Amino acid sequence: MKKLWPDHWKRRYQSALETAATIMILAWPTMLEQVMQTAVQYIDTAMVGTLGTQATAAVGATGTVGWLINGTFSALSVGFLSLISRACGAQDAEKAKRVVGQATLVVLVGGILSTLICSGVSGKIPVWMQVDPSIQRLTASYFLILYLPMLPRTASIIFGTVLRAAGDTRTPMKVGIIVNSINVVLNYLLIYDIREVSLFGICLTIPGAGLGVIGAAIASAVSFTWGGIHITWVLWKHPMVSPRGISLKPDMSILKPWARISFPNVLQRFGTSLGYVVFASMINALGEAATAAHTIANTVESAFYIPGYGMQTAAATLIGNAYGAKDEKRMKSLSAMFIPIEVVLMIGSGAVLFAAAPALVGLFSKSTEIISPGSTVLRMVAISEPFYGFSIIVEGMMMGVGKTRAPFVYNIIGMWCIRIVGTFLYTRIFHMGLVAAWGCMIAHNMLLFVLYLVVYVRGTWNPLSAEQ
């Protein structure tokens, strides 16, 4: 009697399930970590939002500068992710530790330099960002306090990537959860004045420093400092990638390939983040309401990219492992599994965002002047989410194998030729508003989808295919 389920089909089915399980095991802690970070960002924005539109604008006006700073160090960590994941795939523990030693050197140098730079330009940032003169001093103070602890923040970013590259995504998740919990508690104590709260009929006096926006900055700075110290301690004790006993002197056999991978990604992050700064400055010039609506929409939108970026980390790590082991078959099977999982996740998140946009914006503001445009731009971007998710995954696979030049070119073209030029024309020449600016952002994302689709279909992302 002929089998209804042939053995080779059964093996393929089991292999696909195992691959999907591996992907999700690696991806879910990163997703949860980002959920917690985004939840705190929601809470921060909502707490500050109760102080008024000016407070929301002061906090959000320099947000894109923060993306520039954090994005630069995230880009530097990409080279370490690629080298460590490949070394682990090749079972070369000695090389993995040497890479971690150089990562520690980059944390020390980069953290100290960025602290000096951020402190020096804090007073000029609001002017460059065309922030309303009435809130420039408050914005400058918020920025200075927030970015004083750049050394521990740099450690959190780079050492977190090191641990993920070694397959440990749970530790950065746990550290992130504690950091965010500290931030929320300190926000509650530092932003508001002393107040009376009724709980189950009992009247309680809640202490408060009444520092407003400055209190929010101090809370974030303290929590980031604790997170950097904690993740450094965890890495120091790690059995596989601890830098203990490893020289911190520059090792060009590590730094040269790291620079070849990281430098294009740094240029990409710097170029796109600078584009975000220019984009935000043009929106800031539209007035406080546009700035507040843009800030809130960005905050809401960030939660719905979590599945994409969680899967991107898993893609970079697992593809890097397979590349280090020279296993082309596994690289192809992983890529074939990542794409449909990612697209389904992003369709789901996009559908929720589209349906819930007005309610989500309403969490942060009760002003119809903010809710109406904020809801419109979120519904626009919700439709493009699956396409952007595809781009995120292909870029992650390219990061895993060390191919960072093409993503640099694609993102720079999309940012500056589509988003920035388009926004300038629509807001400055044709005098259109926030909705038109976000339309340019979506056009940028769709261009990336087309470019990455060509890369994926042609197979040029996979170096092992090209070697044959």
Image (spheres, grey):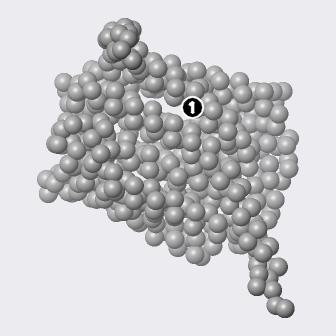
Quadrant placement of the C terminus: bottom right
Q: Is residue 328 left or right of residue 404?
A: right
Q: In the shown orientation, is residue 430 left or right of residue 22?
A: left
Q: Nearer the viewer, residue 311 or 132?
A: 311
Residue 356, horizontal then vertical, whole percent: 33, 51
Residue sitting at x 80%, y 63%: 326
Figure disc tally? 1
Q: Residues within 10 Å of mark 1 (few under 14, many from 20)?
A: many
- In the displayed structure, 455 sits above or below 207; it is below
| Residue wearing tag 1 | 177
Query: 416 above or below 288?
Result: below
Task: Work out whether 334 lies above or below 454.
Answer: above
Which residue is nearer to you in this view: 70 or 380? 380
Q: Position of residue 32 (x, y in %)?
A: 57, 42
Q: Residue at x 58, y 27 (%)?
A: 178
The image position of residue 329, as x and y in percent, is: 76, 70
